[in-house]
Amino acid sequence: MAAASAAGVAGDTKVYTGKLTLYVLLPCGVAATGGLIIGYDIGISGGVTSMDMFLEKFFPSVLHHEQTAQGTSQYCKFNSQPLTAFTSSLYLAALIASLFVASFTLAMGRKWSMFGGGVSFLAGATLNGAAQNIAMLVAGRVLLGIGVAFAGLSIPIYLSELAPPRLRGMLNIVLQLMITVGIFSANLVNFGAAKIKGGWGWRLSLGLAAVPACAITVGSIFLPDSPNSLINSGRHEEARRVLCRIRGTDEVDDEYADLVAASEVAFSVERPWREILRRRYRPQVTMAILIPIFQQLTGINAIMFYAPVLFKTIGLGGDASLMSAVITGLVNIVATFVSIAAVDSHGRRKLLFQGGCQMLICQVITGTLIGVTFGTSGDDSISKAFAVCVVVFICVYVSGFAWSWGPLGVLLPSEIFPLEIRPMGQSISVAVNMLCTFAVAEAFLPMLCRMRFGLFYFFSGWVLVMTLFIALFLPETKGVPIEKMTVVWETHWFWGKFLKNEGAHVEVADSKVQMHNGTAV
Ligand code: BGC
C-alpha cells in the first residue's frame, strides 16, 4: 500500500526547474571530504605496517620474523594476528556502529550525522598519531571506524538529496572518486613518511588524517541540512528556503510538494525494517546484500590494504614497494573518471562485464607469474623484471575494478530502493560492505600464507561467479528515473516471474519508461 502511494507521489517523470548552483556544489564539496578520510584510512594501514620503526614499537615479533624469515615461506612473512587486527579493527567498529547510525541520522538529520563522523575521525586520528601503546592504537582505529559508519551512511544520502535529480548518479560517483583520492594521498604520504629520519614517519601518516577530519567537522557546522531532513523534523519553512537556495530559483513548488508528500509516505510506513522484508522487495534486498559481498570478493582490498606488504613479499625493496602502491593508487583515481564518463551512456551492465573480464584475466596472469617465478614455497627469489610485470598487471586489474565494481558498488544500492525503505536499504548495504571488508582484512595475510599464489585464482573464481550473476540477474538501470525503478524488476526475465503475484507498485503500461531487452529506451 505504502509502496503504491510512494510511486504515485512521484508517479510522472517530472522535470523540476532549477540548476546546479554554488549552494549545491559547496556543501557537496565539504561532504565529499568524508570520502577523502574513508579512502585515507583504507590506504594508510598497509604502508604503515610495512615501516620497520612502526613494527619495532608495536609489533616487534613481526619485525623479527620479517628479518629472519629463514625456514618460513616468504608468503608467510607478515602473517601476524595482531598486525591484521590493526587493519581490520576499524571495519569491525564501523560494522557495529553502522547498525545504530541509521536511527541517529533519521532523528538528528544528515548534517549532525556528518558532524558526528568528523569529530570521531578527528579523535581517532589524534589518538593514532600520538599512540604510545597498542591500546591507544586500537582505540584510535575504533573511533575511525565509528567515523566511517557515520560518513558512509549520511554522506551518500545527503549528496543524493541535495543533487538535482539528473545529476544524482554523477555526484554519487564523485564520492567514490574522493575515496580513491584519499587512498592515493595515503600512499603518497606513506612514501614520504617512510623516509623521515628518526623513524617517527608513521606518526605523521596516521596523524595527517586529522586534516580532512577538521575540514568536515568545521564544514558541517556551516552546512545546510537537506530539505528532506528538514521536512522530516517539521521545519517546513526552512526546508523550502534551503530548496530555493540550492536550486537557484523560487519556482520549487513541484519539487517541494513532492518532497513533502514523499516524506508523508515515508512516515506512514510505521515499520520500515519489517516493510523491507516483504517479498516484493526481495530483488532489491538481494542486490543490496550481494553487491557489496561481490565487490569485496573481487579482492580489491587485498591490494588497497596490503599492496606494500604484498610487493615486499615478492621481493621488492621497501621504497619500491611503497612507490608501487602510489602507482596503483594513481591508476585507481584515473580509471574512476572513465566510469564517470561512461556510466550513463554505456550503462551499468556493460561496465560490470568489461571490468569483470579484465580483472579475471589479470588475476590469473598475476597468480601464474608469481607462482612460476616465486615458486610454491616462496623461497625462490623473483627477478626485478618479473616483479615489475606483477605490478603492471595489478595496475590493469585495479583499473578494471575502478570503472566497474568500485563506483557501481556504491551507486547501485543507492538507486534501486523505493523511497520509503531507502535508508534501510542503504544501511544494509553499508553494513554488509563493512562486514566483508573486515573479513578480507582479517583473512588476506593468513590466506596468502596458506594458498600462496593460488589466492589470486581464488579471487578470480569469484569474479567469474559475479560476472555471470550480473549477466543473469541485474537489470540495466541506466536512464531509469529513480521513482520508476520498479519497472526494471517487473520486466526482468527472472524477477518478473518472481514478482508476478505481488501486484506491481507502478502501472507498467502507464509508465513513460519503455523497456527493451531489459534496458530503458
Ligand atoms: C570499496 C572499498 C575499496 C575502494 C577502492 C570502494 O568502492 O568499498 O572497499 O577499498 O572502493 O577504491
Image: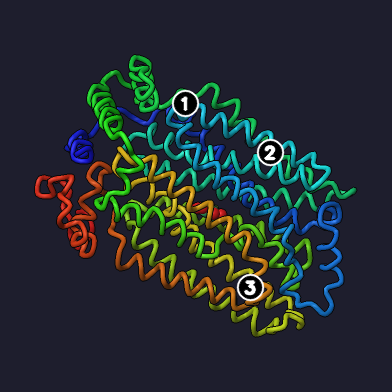
The foreground one among 18 and 309 is: 309
The nearer-to-camera label among 2 and 1 is 1
Residue 343's label in the rendered image is none
Image quadrant containing the N terminus: top left
The answer to whether the residue bearing label 1 lies less than 8 angstroms from the nearest atom of ligand 1 is no
- Per the image, label 1 sits on a secondary structure element best described as helix
Q: Earlier in the sequence, mark 1 or mark 3?
A: 1
- Per the image, label 3 sits on a secondary structure element best described as helix
Q: Which residue is mark 2?
A: 124
Residue type of the residue flagged with mark 2: Gly
Image quadrant containing the C terminus: bottom left
**Residue 159 position (above or below residue 451):** above
Q: Residue furthest right?
A: 198
Q: Earlier in the sequence, mark 2 or mark 1?
A: 1
CA separation, marks 1 and 3? 48 Å
Residue 108's label in the rendered image is 1
- Looking at the rendering, which quadrant does residue 468 occupy? bottom left
Left or right side of 411 for 394: right
Residue 166 point in image, percent of width and height? 31, 39
Residue 390's label in the rendered image is 3
Residue at point 54%, 44% (across, down)? 178
Q: Are marks 3 and 2 in contact (CB under 8 Å)?
A: no
Residue at point 27%, 27% (across, down)? 264
- Per the image, label 2 sits on a secondary structure element best described as helix
